[in-house]
Amino acid sequence: MSTRRIARVNDLIRKEISELLMREIRDPRLGGLLSVTEVDTSPDLRHAKVFVSVMGSEEEKRQVEEGLAAAAGFLRRGLGERLSLRHIPQLDFQRDESIERGSHLLELIEEVTPGDSLGEVD
């Protein structure tokens, strides 16, 4: 399968999972700041790593991981109803720390330059 098609499928799966999480999942563990940042599907479309970013404490992150694991079957079934793919991939949710790292870096920059703002020009 071409890399262009896999990239389109990855983007489509990311959008649909985000939509399902926002509108159809009623699990209280998934109520916090949760964002699907990336999907990486295998070339045969049998497996997909779904990277999610969660803002909150370690306990909240752990609960989100448990909630996503519990909802994986529901989400896969929802993808099957929404997408016309021959195979709907097994979903493997993994934590993406990139947004938190970026936020932490911005805080460090603010500490180093307390009087300066990032958007100001002298």
Image (cartoon, rainbow, N blue to C red):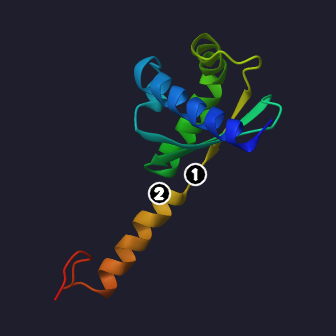
- The label shown at residue 85 is none
Rendered residue at 60%/21% (across/down):
75
Q: Give the percent coordinates (x, y) of residue 101.
A: 49, 65
Q: Give the percent coordinates (x, y) of residue 114.
A: 23, 84
Q: Farthest left residue?
A: 122
Rendered residue at 65%/29% (across/down):
69
In the figure, 29 relative to 23: above or below?
A: below
Crowding at label 1, few (<14), some or many (≥20) Cα neighbours within 10 Å? some
Q: Give the percent coordinates (x, y) of residue 47.
A: 77, 32
Q: Quadrant of the C terminus?
A: bottom left
Q: Check disc 1 and give the amino acid type.
A: Asp
Q: Is residue 101 left or right of residue 77?
A: left
Q: Farthest top residue?
A: 81
In the figure, 115 relative to 27: above or below?
A: below
Q: Is residue 105 left or right of residue 16?
A: left
Residue designated by label 1 = 96
Rendered residue at 48%/43% (across/down):
60
Q: Check disc 2 and give the amino acid type.
A: Ile
At mark 1, the secondary structure is loop
Q: Is residue 62 left or right of residue 2?
A: left
- Tell whether label 1 touches label 2 (CB within 8 Å): yes
Q: Quadrant of residue 92?
A: top right
At mark 2, the secondary structure is helix
Residue designated by label 2 = 99
Crowding at label 2, few (<14), some or many (≥20) Cα neighbours within 10 Å? some
Q: Is residue 12 left or right of residue 89?
A: left
